[in-house]
Image (spheres, rainbow, N blue to C red):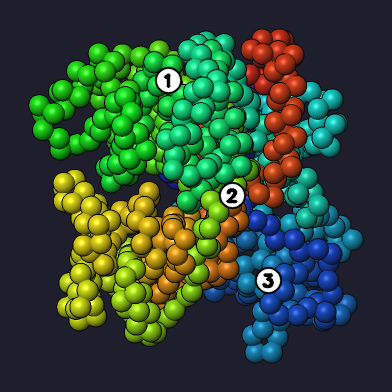
């Protein structure tokens, strides 16, 4: 049959579907034949070789061949058919529920092959709802049902029906599946051709075939992701032109005098990379990552002062007003007595103050402007913006990053994150950014000691906190909720702040801070905490990022099983930021296996990169870093950790193709280009935003 639309044919026109089932498929995002054959099994059941009935054991998957000895139909609300079959070693019972499709097919004397899970009933082996294949004789055997693909659930369609429909569609539309890679590339990487890969991903005979098919599709996912990223980078390199921001010895010496401490070797290495990028008309797109407390802010300030020394403006964008305020205070301290003009732009400012800042920014009188999303509003106009620094960049969506980037003609672009990013994720989410890593903490910084307690041990925790407060140290207690919830049996920060102040720490000054407070209130609380007018801060995750209080040494996280690994690591970074020993005390009664695993990993290491890799393994890329906001497609087959080497191979292949054909304009790359557009579509504009 001829299908003019090929793989874009609406699924309702394929055999076995029709309008009603098409609606059910559409609910899970399957509208076309091409999308259906890309609906891969989530796992497989491999039944192996045919067994003798006498060798069957309960709780195992098995396949047998036998002769039908009896057939019994039982009708009613839940109709079923029960048969006995035998081979030369014994007999067993098989039953199917709601299986009218077998009516008239099962007859005494018929030879059949069945594959399914073995169980016991009244000391006899039983198969329930197994797959079945009708044979003309016991020798008439094939591998047709030796493998059972298990597809993700589609409400309203039986799993076996999904498998049947996919099989029929693959047969009917095989001729429309065209290869997009060269035979040379497939041979070099030992990859299946695409038609064979589709057949084996849906119906492999064994684990080896399934893995060969998975490898082909994993390679393609990584290949096209890297192709989109590298095309985006190439486009920017061609069209974008920034100002040169050179940094000679005089500027370097002048900047270093501003810091009351020597920079670490790791910071110096990263600064050399950034300075090299900025001394070019090609715009810098660099990711600066480092563990909590590694000194990223100092490096970012160095870069900012290089721009200011060249008479250009700098924008620093933070995810919260607390962090923006903290950056402002830090920079004011470092630049005290200098001619560098700094301003803070956040919500809730008086209109007259805001208007004055905006006027000075537009006239070039302000060198460094610090703020939150306020910086991307239309009325913020820079005179000569040359460098954009974004802190905790994963807190911002693509549109926000693109908007602030557009404030200058084509500024250099530095993003920072204290959420360590596994190298595999850096190559996907930030594949179009150069990566700089501060991999060592400043000297004298001690690893935070972390311990897990049960809820029943909470008094032991409180006694420890009291001992630290009595010694003049400060602490945080964090809760996942601000207010009580009817659905979740969790303590809340609001209730606990009052309880702890009255009943547990009455001799200490306890205060509550949370994200719903007015900016002024939060700023006032943080000022008092830094000035040691508050001993203990009860908080929500508003303190997750950037809070820097040197005398805060103890952190308690209640219901710690409710937090992700990266979030726990960020919270732990709020203590032990001076030379004093820091402590992180987790309180949890985790029953969930994944939560237990997270907490176990967290208590065993303070290495942010190890934690990040384990977090990626547990949660996957979509949740780990909100990859959806980056506009890149989710990975269905590839694994960013296990397939890291495969990603490097795919990236090298992409680079080789683009060196030879930068725009994929050659005839031999026509199908590659079509496939790229099919997979990424309008996501290119998001990739362009970084």
| Marks 1, 2: nearer the viewer | 1
Q: Earlier in the sequence, mark 3 or mark 2?
A: 3
Q: Earlier in the sequence, mark 1 or mark 2?
A: 1
**Going by the image, does 38 lie left or right of 477?**
right
Secondary structure of residue under mark 2: loop
> Which percent across, then down, holds residue 13?
53, 32
Residue under pointer 3 = 117
Mark sitting on residue 670:
none
Front residue of this view, candidates 447 and 609:
447
Residue under pointer 2 = 440
**Residue at horizontal 72 percent and vertical 74 percent from the top:** 60
Task: Characterize the local packing of mark 1: few (<14), some (14-19) or many (20 or more) Cα atoms within 10 angstroms.
Answer: some
| Marks 3, 1: nearer the viewer | 1
Task: Characterize the local packing of mark 3: few (<14), some (14-19) or many (20 or more) Cα atoms within 10 angstroms.
Answer: some
- The vertical placement of 612 against 62, above or below, is above
Residue 4 in view here: no
Q: Earlier in the sequence, mark 3 or mark 1?
A: 3
**Going by the image, does 42 lie left or right of 244?**
right
Residue under pointer 1 = 309
């Amino acid at each position: 049959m001829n299908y003019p639309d090929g793989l874009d044919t609406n699924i309702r026109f394929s055999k076995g579907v029709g309008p009603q089932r098409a609606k059910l498929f559409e609910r899970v995002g399957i509208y076309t034949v091409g999308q259906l054959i890309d609906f891969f099994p989530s796992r497989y059941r491999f039944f192996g070789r045919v067994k003798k009935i006498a060798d069957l054991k309960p709780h195992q998957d098995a396949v047998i061949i036998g002769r039908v000895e009896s057939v019994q139909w039982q009708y009613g609300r839940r109709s079923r058919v029960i048969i006995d079959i035998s081979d030369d070693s014994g007999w067993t019972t098989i039953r199917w529920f709601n299986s009218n499709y077998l009516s008239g097919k099962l007859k005494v004397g018929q030879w059949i092959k069945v594959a399914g899970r073995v169980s016991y009933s009244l000391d006899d082996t039983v198969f329930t709802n197994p797959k079945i294949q009708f044979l003309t004789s016991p020798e008439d055997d094939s591998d047709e049902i030796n493998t059972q693909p298990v597809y993700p659930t589609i409400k309203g369609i039986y799993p076996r029906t999904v498998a049947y429909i996919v099989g029929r569609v693959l047969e009917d539309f095989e001729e429309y599946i065209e290869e997009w890679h060269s035979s040379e590339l497939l041979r070099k990487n030992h990859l299946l051709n695409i038609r064979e890969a589709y057949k084996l991903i849906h119906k492999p005979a064994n684990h080896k075939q399934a893995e060969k098919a998975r490898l082909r599709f994993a390679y393609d996912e990584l290949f096209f992701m890297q192709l989109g990223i590298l095309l985006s980078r190439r486009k920017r390199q061609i069209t974008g032109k920034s100002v040169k921001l050179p940094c000679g010895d005089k500027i370097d010496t002048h900047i270093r005098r501003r810091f009351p401490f020597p920079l670490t070797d790791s910071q110096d290495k990263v600064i050399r990379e950034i300075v090299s990028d900025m001394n070019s008309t090609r715009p810098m797109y660099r990711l600066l990552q480092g563990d909590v407390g590694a000194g990223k802010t100092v490096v970012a300030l160095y870069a900012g002062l290089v721009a200011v020394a060249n008479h250009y403006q700098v924008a620093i964008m933070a995810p919260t007003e607390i962090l923006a305020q903290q950056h402002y205070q830090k920079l004011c301290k470092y630049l005290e007595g200098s001619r560098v003009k700094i301003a803070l732009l956040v919500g809730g400012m008086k209109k007259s103050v805001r208007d004055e800042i905006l006027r000075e920014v537009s006239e070039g009188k302000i060198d460094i402007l610090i703020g939150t999303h306020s910086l991307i509003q239309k009325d913020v106009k820079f005179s000569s913006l040359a460098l954009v620094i974004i802190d905790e960049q994963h807190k911002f969506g693509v549109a926000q990053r693109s908007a602030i980037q557009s404030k200058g003609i084509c500024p250099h672009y530095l993003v920072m994150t204290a959420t360590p990013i596994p190298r595999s994720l850096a190559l996907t989410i930030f594949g179009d950014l150069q990566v700089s890593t501060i991999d060592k903490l400043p000297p004298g910084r001690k690893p935070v000691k972390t311990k897990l307690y049960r809820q029943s041990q909470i008094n032991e925790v409180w006694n420890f906190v009291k001992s630290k407060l009595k010694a003049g140290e400060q602490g945080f207690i964090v809760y996942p909720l601000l207010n009580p919830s009817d659905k979740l049996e969790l303590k809340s920060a609001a209730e606990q702040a009052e309880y702890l102040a009255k009943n547990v720490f009455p001799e200490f000054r306890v205060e509550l801070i949370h994200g719903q407070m007015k900016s002024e209130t939060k700023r006032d609380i943080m000022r008092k905490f830094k000035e040691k007018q508050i001993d203990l801060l009860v908080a929500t995750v508003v303190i997750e990022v950037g809070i820097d209080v040197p005398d805060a040494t103890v952190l308690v996280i209640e219901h710690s099983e409710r937090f992700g690994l990266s979030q726990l690591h960020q919270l732990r970074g709020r203590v032990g930021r001076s030379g004093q020993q820091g402590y992180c005390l987790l309180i949890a009664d985790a029953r969930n296996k994944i939560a237990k695993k997270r907490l176990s990993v967290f208590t065993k290491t303070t290495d942010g990169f190890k934690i990040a890799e384990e977090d990626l393994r547990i949660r996957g890329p979509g949740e780990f870093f909100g990859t959806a906001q980056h506009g890149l497609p989710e990975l269905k087959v590839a694994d960013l950790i296990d397939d890291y080497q495969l990603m490097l191979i795919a990236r090298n292949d992409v680079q080789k193709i683009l060196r030879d054909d930068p725009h994929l304009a050659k005839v031999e790359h026509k199908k590659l280009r079509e496939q790229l557009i099919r997979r990424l579509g309008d996501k290119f504009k998001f990739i362009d935003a970084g």
